[in-house]
Each structure stands twice: as structure tokens, then as C-alpha cells.
């Protein structure tokens, strides 16, 4: 893959046992790929430990595009983990995470990208006249209850935290990916909790959608786990290793040091007095090498230190 040409947009598709739904999703997405310009758009498919032919189907469908990445996790970890992995390897300045079936009409991708010109996050919103109508009364009711809980525990005012289509500027996305801990379906609510704590700007984009059958969310056991995760959000102590550097450190110098230590998916949080290079939670060893090369200090940083900075992907 040649990345000499700047990639403007990365489309991240998490997929778990989606072999039968990928083709219809691709047909919905294909016209929009032409509109976005395939020469500067990449598609990243993250197979989250599927037991069917998801990866082969994804390769057959998307393999002819100019810029693609296919990543297969050895075990199923959850949608949140898959999207964070896609964020870590994405090259685009703007990222869109979308479900494999493209149930959110991909024509809204253009509107999401327009919103990202002035906002760090641009999540899709399926809300119509104050609520979301699913394919059954039970799903509609449970979705409404979950959203109330999500707003209560995360502090967000958004009425659709669970929309499967979300846009991000790459720098803030990287930071959210590094900080996030929830691998399952509650990762969306955690993301908005973190966004509020970091004072990120959010512009929802109204989207239309088809309630495609085959969702892997199971009302019952999954709902209990999601509520448990929500309740834990305010009590979670988010902390990551960082390398504290001079405020005017050059991104190019950091990129060289990161390659030397074989670590990727980093973000530089630049503030008024310093710059904090945020590392994965298991990245302290690499951080020691980067700190030595760039004359920085390896330490731990918490959410309050990372708030209201500028975020640059490395």
C-alpha cells in the first residue's frame, strides 16, 4: 500500500461474523466511496475474531480499492476493542466508524465529514421527533431506558449514544482510543463520558437508517453487562503513561522515536506549558526509549491534565 498520497478519510468497519451481511453493506457504501474519492480514502476492516468467512468476504469485496487494511483479531474482544484498533492504525485526518451492514445510509458520510471541519466528534443521530423507533416495541423501550441511563452516568446530553456511525478527527479519536477501557457495546457511552471530561467539541449529524436484522446485541445478558459498565464510569480512574515534552516539540521527531521503539497509535496533547505524548497502557517500556531520545520525562497522566488541549496524531 502506498501512502505517499495523503489519506484524507479512513472508514473503519468492525466486523464479527458478518460474512452474510458484508456484501449488502458494500453495495450501499460503493457509490459514496466514489464521491469521497477513492484515491485519498482508505477502508479498514477489523475482523473481531469471527468464526465464519468474514475476513475472506471482506477481502473479496474491498480488496480492489486503492487503500485498504484488513486486520484479524485472534479472539472476539468486542466492538469497542475493534474500533479502537482501527483508530490506532488509521491514516486519515478524519475517521468514520460504521457497521458492516451500513444500516446508516452512507450518504450521510459527506455530512459527517463536513461537520468534522469544525468539530472534534460528529456522531450520527437516529433520533426523530425526540425518540428512536426500532423494529420491535421491546427494542424501542430498552433503547430508551438505556439512553436515559447513559446520559445519567456519562453526563452526555446526546439522545443517541449507540448509533453505529460516528465521525472523529484523528487526533481526538486516538486519545479516546488510548483512554478507553470498555471493549463491549458500552464503549460508545464511555467515549462520550471521556469526551465530556476532555471538553471535546461534538456536533451530532441527523442520519437515516434501516433497522437491518442480525444484530449481535442480545437483550437480557448484554443489557445487564452494559448497565454494569455504565454505573462504573464515574468511578473509573483513567490514567495512561505519558512522556512529558517541551511544548514546541516537533511531530516529526516524535514519529521517528516512536518507530525506533516500535509503538504506534500515539497522540500528542499539546498545552500551554508542555506537551504530553500519550501512550498505550502497556507502552511504558517504549515510553522510556522515547523519553531518552527526546529528553522528556516518563510519568502517568490523568484526565484533568489532558483536558482542553490540542490533539495531534503521531
Image: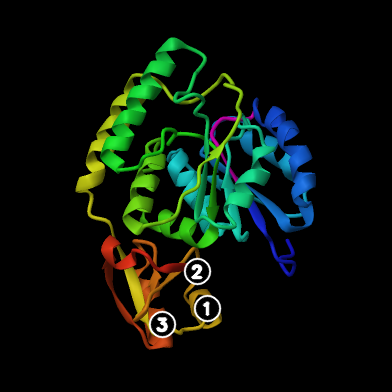
Q: Earlier in the sequence, mark 1 or mark 2?
A: 1
Q: Gap in Å between the C-alphas at discs 3 and 1? A: 11 Å
Q: Nearer the viewer, residue 57 or 103?
A: 103
Q: Secondary structure at mark 1?
A: helix
Q: Nearer the viewer, residue 313 or 84?
A: 313
96 relative to 164, above or below = below
x 53%, y 52%: residue: 168
- Magenta segment range? 12-19
Q: Quadrant of residue 61?
A: top right
Q: Is residue 241 left or right of residue 209?
A: left
Q: Secondary structure at mark 2?
A: strand
Q: Residue 50 in the image: state x and y as whole percent.
A: 54, 34
x 72%, y 32%: residue: 28
Q: Is residue 27 left or right of residue 236?
A: right
Q: Secondary structure at mark 3?
A: loop
218 relative to 109, above or below = above
Q: Residue furthest top?
A: 137
x 50%, y 69%: residue: 312
Q: Which residue is labeled 3 in the image?
A: 247
Q: Residue 260 in the image: state x and y as whole percent.
A: 51, 78
Work out whether residue 13 can be spotted: yes
- How many residues crowd mark 1 within 10 Å: few (<14), some (14–19), many (20+)? some
Q: Is residue 16 magenta?
A: yes
Q: Residue furthest front?
A: 129
45 relative to 163, above or below = below
Q: Which mark is residue 168?
A: none
Q: Which mark is residue 251?
A: 1
Q: Which residue is labeled 2 in the image?
A: 312
* Cβ–Cβ under 8 Å for marks 1 and 2: yes
Amino acid at each position: 500500500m502506498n501512502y505517499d498520497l495523503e489519506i484524507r478519510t479512513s472508514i473503519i468497519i468492525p466486523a464479527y461474523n458478518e460474512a452474510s451481511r458484508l456484501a449488502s453493506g458494500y453495495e450501499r457504501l460503493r457509490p459514496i466511496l466514489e464521491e469521497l474519492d477513492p484515491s485519498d480514502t482508505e477502508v479498514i476492516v477489523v475482523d473481531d475474531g469471527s468464526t465464519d468467512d468474514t475476513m475472506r468476504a471482506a477481502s473479496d469485496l474491498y480488496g480492489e480499492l486503492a487503500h485498504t487494511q484488513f486486520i484479524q483479531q485472534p479472539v472476539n474482544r468486542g466492538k469497542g476493542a475493534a474500533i479502537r484498533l482501527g483508530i490506532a492504525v488509521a491514516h486519515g485526518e478524519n475517521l468514520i466508524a460504521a457497521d458492516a451492514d451500513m444500516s446508516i445510509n452512507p450518504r450521510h458520510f459527506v455530512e459527517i465529514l463536513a461537520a468534522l471541519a469544525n468539530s472534534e466528534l460528529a456522531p450520527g443521530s437516529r433520533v426523530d421527533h425526540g425518540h428512536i423507533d426500532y423494529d420491535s416495541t421491546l427494542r424501542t423501550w430498552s433503547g430508551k431506558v438505556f439512553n436515559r441511563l447513559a446520559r445519567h452516568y456519562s453526563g452526555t446530553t446526546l439522545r443517541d449514544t449507540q448509533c453505529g456511525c460516528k465521525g472523529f478527527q484523528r487526533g481526538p479519536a486516538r486519545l479516546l482510543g488510548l483512554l478507553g477501557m470498555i471493549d463491549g457495546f458500552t464503549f460508545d457511552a464511555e467515549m462520550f463520558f471521556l469526551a465530556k471530561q476532555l471538553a471535546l467539541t461534538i456536533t451530532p449529524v441527523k442520519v437515516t437508517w434501516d433497522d437491518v436484522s442480525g444484530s449481535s446485541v442480545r437483550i437480557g445478558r448484554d443489557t445487564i453487562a452494559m448497565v454494569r459498565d455504565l454505573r462504573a464510569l464515574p468511578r473509573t480512574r483513567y490514567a495512561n503513561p505519558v512522556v512529558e515534552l517541551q511544548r514546541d516539540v516537533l511531530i516529526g521527531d516524535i514519529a521517528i522515536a516512536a518507530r525506533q521503539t516500535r509503538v504506534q497509535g500515539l497522540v500528542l496533547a499539546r498545552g500551554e506549558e508542555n506537551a504530553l505524548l500519550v501512550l498505550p497502557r502497556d507502552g511504558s517500556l517504549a515510553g522510556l526509549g522515547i523519553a531518552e531520545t527526546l529528553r522528556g520525562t516518563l510519568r502517568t497522566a490523568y484526565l484533568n491534565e489532558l483536558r482542553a488541549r490540542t490533539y495531534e496524531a503521531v
